[in-house]
Amino acid sequence: MNEQDFLAAYDPRDYPAVAVTVDVVALTIRDGALHLLLIRRAAPPFAGHWALPGGFVRPDEDLAAGARRELAEETGLGGERLRRVHLEQLATYGGPDRDPRMRVVSVAHLAFAPDLPDPVADTDADDATWLPVTALTSRQLAFDHGRIIDDGLERARSKLEYTPLATRFLEPEFTITELRAVYETVWGHPLHAGNFHRKVLSVPGFVESTGASTERGGARGGPRAKLYRAGDARLLHPALLRPAREETVR
Amino acid sequence: MNEQDFLAAYDPRDYPAVAVTVDVVALTIRDGALHLLLIRRAAPPFAGHWALPGGFVRPDEDLAAGARRELAEETGLGGERLRRVHLEQLATYGGPDRDPRMRVVSVAHLAFAPDLPDPVADTDADDATWLPVTALTSRQLAFDHGRIIDDGLERARSKLEYTPLATRFLEPEFTITELRAVYETVWGHPLHAGNFHRKVLSVPGFVESTGASTERGGARGGPRAKLYRAGDARLLHPALLRPAREETVR
DNA sequence: CTAAGTTGTTCTCAGATTGAGTTGTTCTCA
DNA sequence: TGAGAACAACTCAATCTGAGAACAACTTAG
């Protein structure tokens, strides 16, 4: 039987309930480290554990809209700054036993945000914070959120290779060094400054010059850096590949 | 309110019903052209239109298991040959008005299969066939399946760049020329035979030699080709990039 | 059986891209 | 004022890529 035949004869109330939620893996860079927005659960199951921000999709909203709403609620963000956050669908997690209470199919999303203020104290009991991704063990995480986060991090690392989305971690105007810092913290290892510079400027549409420079030199000296903004490319051609990790063959 | 609080106070029967289905974009190569498994709808809505194979997720099954089951039902495939089909999650489509009857959230999957027999006549009224992807206009497709197919094709094209999954379109033993033909039909343009050969053999873990050769030369002459099987790499390093299309910047 | 044409595989070579290091200059801090 | 930092540009060798040629092993047509 296929989907449509089934639906034709289907009374929703007769069927085992499935809940559809959206969850968000929201990443940002603070103090040179990759951080993740998490919520501390007050109630069981998994009381005291960390969980991804998320909730039910509302009847009138799109999945992406739901994810953006959840992000807005949890960060207190709105308007222009919310619109600048990159949001994409990550994957959907729907194993029968993800949640002990009922079947929950969760459409996970991935967000890249510039450094944001600490989440506002929400009306509900749970508290939200940005946590460094290195500070997490999967034991401290609710449900299968450890797995979702791992998938999100891997997706983020590979997205930086072939899209200009690294710019979404920064303010609209940035220096090449700031952009390199994004790559270094997401990929977790240092890059050659000169080669990175050359590459970024040579990929068409990655960045465009604003003509201006920073007001001051670097914190510990050095000349003022030129400022750039994101270009109009959606994809990087050629890509900016991360150096092969030792074990290319496994 | 977040997901977990909500669920704690939640009685499924009170909530607007959401149906969760899995759909499959199944691709194969027949006679040198990329084909897609489609089902002709008998009943409205979209009677007479083509639709992706799919159906409800069962209470006890995983999303991936549901997709594989749908694929098995529609192709009549089982056992070893079904296991060899590559299946991955594509994306989830859940706009409020996708289906005129009720809210349906559909988790689309993408499958790569070697050339398969024509689908068996199923018990239900609709008939299933492999159709060349070029023969489709979005008008002839039900729901938002045109969009899903487009996303699947683009994903397939890019997966060939950085994974060895092109081998999943072939039998377990294949020649380099057959592998090149997969790339050419999925990407839609010819590749340089010599360079392709060099590249495939130089990427660690892409293919390994069986030591054997084909029984006969090509249909119109030429030497026997060496046979290879898929190697153990999950990712191609370095990737096999498709030639940049003219408009890299848009 | 032979000739003509096709194809798998390996080379060659020029051009582009990459990795690594150097240089020069501008700036901050002590 | 001097020392150190860091932006930006450059150099050079190693590698990778695109394009084409060579050649032997095969096919079919005649």
Image (tube, coloured by chain):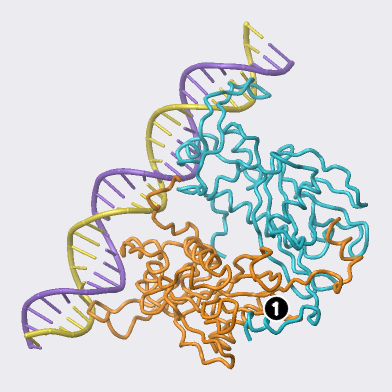
Chain colours: A cyan, B orange, C purple, D yellow
| Residue at figure coordinates x 69%, y 66% from the top left | A92
Q: Is residue D29 left or right of residue A166?
A: left
Q: Chain of mark 1?
A: B
Q: Is residue A160 above or below residue C4?
A: above
| Residue at figure coordinates x 50%, y 87% from the top left | B119
Residue A73 at x, y = what percent?
80, 48
What is the number of callouts on the image?
A: 1
Q: Is residue B227 left or right of residue B142?
A: left
Q: Is residue B168 above or below residue C12?
A: below
Residue B106 at x, y = what percent?
65, 70
Please name the residue that numbered disc 1 is placed on: B57
Residue A63 at x, y = what percent?
69, 60
> Which three-letter amino acid code belongs to the residue tagged 1?
Val
Q: Is residue B137 above or below residue A160?
A: below
Residue A156 at x, y = what percent?
63, 52
Q: Is residue B43 left or right of residue C28?
A: left
The kind of secondary structure element at disc 1 is: loop
- Crowding near pointer 1: few (<14 within 10 Å), some, many (20+)? many
B145 or A202: nearer the viewer:
B145
Q: Is residue A86 left or right of residue B25?
A: right
Q: Quadrant of residue B78?
A: bottom right
Q: Quadrant of residue A64?
A: bottom right
